[in-house]
Amino acid sequence: MTRASHLWLAATTMLVSCGGVGSPPPAEGVSPPPDGGAQAADAVSRPANEIRSEKTRNLAPVVGLDDAAQLAADNLAFGLDLYGQLRARGAGNIVFSQTSISLALAMLYGGAAGGTAAQMATALHFTLPPERLHPAFDALDLALLTPPVGADASAFRLAIANSTWVQKGFAFLPSYLDLLAENYDAGLFTEDFSAAPESARADINRWVSEQTENLIPELLDPESIDARTRLVLANAVYFHGIWWDGFSPVSPDGVFHAPGGDVTVPMMSNPKDNAILWGDVGWTCARLSYNGGTTSMIVLVPDAGTFDAFERGLTASSLAGILAPSSTIWGRLSMPRFKFSTALLLAPVLEQLGMTDAFDAALADFSGMDGARDLSVSEVVHQAVIAVDEQGTTAAAATGTTGLVTIVIDTPGQLFVVDRPFLFFIRHNPTGAILFQGRVVDPSR
């Protein structure tokens, strides 16, 4: 068994006040690998200064299959919209978690009203009405945290935590506290932003660091919180997985055709079939399962010379079709080892998607939180780190040459070499939720 991919992420939404204090199913024709194990997420530690509804989390939300499928489709569409905005702003590697961002903004949406709520629903692709949307998020979160059979902490870990940080003495509606507790297992942690903003920032960063196994030690930069801050919504997601059947422990160097020129990088490989492969005109996909079988990585590789055009032409419906193949084969996957991080300020991205009033102090309406209209969003901060590797990897002295192999769906035992820019998706198989997504255009960076 070889080592897999580690991903860490945290996302926050910060608001300021204008006023005073107040097991995977086998693919068709494919036999699944043997059972693996995983472990449940650890209980979330909570600061002592928590204000919380007397209501408890709904551990058995009544959510129909149609609503669950609709939420997955809507989140996929939102993730693709985000991806389109991010790729237009930079040409490099990208990683982000649409699940983390959606969860954080869903908590915010729970307190929005009027035009602000309508804009958020459109931008975030929230097509379910609020009384069905929040239970659907609750059900999704609970499903994500359900450990695979035979849980093993060293092989699989997925933890999701939500928190809300408020100005000490600032009043919030009981109905909003109930919504947070029942659907997001969240309360309110009090801080004195007015008198000690830097201390509050340190507390929030400490919480994020704990939830992400200390791999995002400082989400909020100095001066990102000031005396005007009244509320910070935070969501943290941590994922660690070991491949079900991954790669050999030593990876020879190979050539990757990056946009800026060829680069030499370690190319992970396996002498035996280790991935499920499928493809169509213009692209090829490979899927690697993580130990426990509930989560997998899908690598989507457009044909040589078509990456930019493929990205521009990708739609939510076409992506959904690509991620749900009707015919697959087992084959061997060779791909580059890579590690990078992405730090994002999402306010301009969300505004471009139509969520404008939330960031305008004169127009924002979050009266569902406090009964007034004195809150507006300052910034949405997102940070993600991804590391994909093999166990015991060292810089190999051997140099190999690679080339893209066209996949023929009806021929088993194909070798698929990922030696050019590609997209990736970390997917929770039972729900279809995309935990993380992004692209690798140059694995050497």
Image: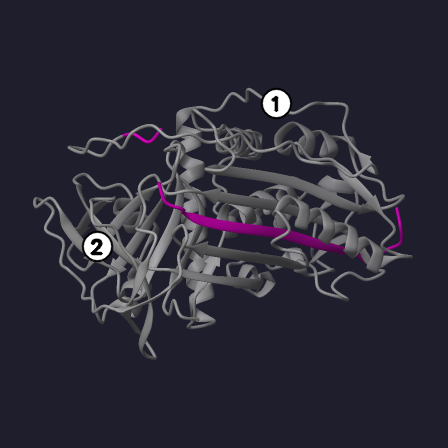
Q: Sort mark 2 into few (<14), some (14-19) or many (20+) by Cα contacts within 10 Å.
A: many
Image quarter where the N terminus lies is: top left
Point out the stretch of residues depicted in magenta: 1-25
Q: In the picture, residue 253 is in which quadrant?
A: bottom left
User: Residue 178 location, x and y as percent?
Assistant: 71, 29
Would you place residue 36 above or below residue 250 in this image? Answer: above
Relative to 145, is 412 on the left or the right? Answer: left
SS class, disc 1: loop
Mark 2, residue position: 284
Q: Is residue 14 magenta?
A: yes
User: Residue 202 location, x and y as percent?
Assistant: 78, 55
Q: Could you tell me the amino acid type at mark 2?
A: Thr
For the question of whether residue 374 can be seen, the reply is no
Compute the Cα span from label 1 to label 2: 41 Å
Mark 1, residue position: 58
Most extreme residue toward the left is 411
Image quarter where the C terminus lies is: bottom left
